[in-house]
Amino acid sequence: MKQPKTAAPIALPPEVKPGQSVELLQELHILTRDGKLNQDSRRKLKQVYHLYQFIEPLLKEVQAEHPGVSLVDHGAGKSYLGFILYDLFFKGLDDGSHIYGIETRAELVERSQELARKFDFPGMSFLPLSVAESTESKELPDRIDIVTALHACNTATDDAIAFALKKKAKFMVLVPCCQAEVASVLRKNKGQSLGKSALTEIWRHPLHTREFGSQVTNVLRCLQLEAHGYQVNVTELVGWEHSMKNELIIASYKNLPRRRPTERLREVLETLGLEEMGNRFFAEQVAASNA
């Protein structure tokens, strides 16, 4: 009597980490049904895994301080980052640790909720909110340990920073995207600024205005974080061949002196004619004891 044939095991690409759920990667449409990666999925997986290398030590540092790590992922999209973080780190925990995915598109939130139920990930929640709305939402704890925002477009990164500051986050991991607001203010005030200083030549031409505006946006974000006592590191997420939106900002709360970055933040806004953006790039009130 012939024995029934058993399915041959899937030969996984070398990019897939040991212990990673193959079925989960297939449900996220990163792996095909036969365990293959296309070029776009390979790029996404490389970005998320590279980001995981930065986030894992932060998770362990929070764990060393207290049980129950809380992480909020803003602009979660299809929640690649959240699911892979949970699968590799959170699913083995039994201490109340939780990941919250914030996403405005209801259909993506519903899909993520379905996946969390399917894979029995009770420590995952998904909320159909904007980043700004989540700051006031009662469905989130008063304090959050880690805030991530991967390719949160334009001002959503700034809203994520404001959220993290209000929630007294110990760490922020940000990959900014599509920064247009500063460039639009530079463009609007260009006529008044051109005669003030030769430095205005840096953003006189429209293409330079866009590129310089993007650069200045992230400089202002870093100064803002430092003006709230954070230590800031800026690096590349992955090689430029994978993404042009490549800047990774990691902020760690160290209660550092705030006066100098506060003064520099104000000076940059004034020098570039961006004073009207002071409400977005705001500093903490500097106490004399923490100058």
Image (cartoon, grey):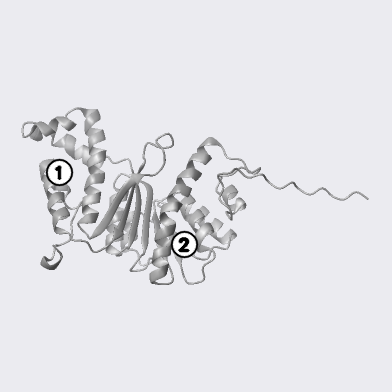
**Sequence order check, earlier mark of 2 and 1:** 2
Closer to us: 105 or 235: 235
Q: Taking 252 as reference, is 102 left or right?
A: right
Residue at the spot 42% in from the left edge and 59% down from the top edge:
57
Which circle marks residue 125 in the picture? 2
Query: Between marks 2 and 1, how big is the CA–CA gap?
Result: 38 Å
Q: Please name the amino acid that badge 1 sits on.
A: Leu
Q: Taking 46 as reference, is 169 left or right?
A: left
Which circle marks residue 274 in the picture? 1
Q: Residue furthest left?
A: 196
Q: Quadrant of residue 99?
A: bottom left
Q: Is residue 271 visible?
A: yes
SS class, disc 2: strand
Residue at the spot 39% in from the left edge and 66% down from the top edge:
62
Q: Please name the amino acid that badge 2 sits on.
A: Ser
Query: Which image quadrant: the C terminus?
Result: bottom left
Q: Residue furthest right?
A: 1
Q: Taking 116 as reference, is 59 left or right?
A: left
SS class, disc 1: loop
Which circle marks residue 2 in the picture? none
Q: Is residue 102 visible?
A: no
Residue 226 lies, in percent from the top left, at 22, 55
Closer to us: 128 or 159: 159
Residue at the spot 43% in from the left edge and 70% down from the top edge:
68
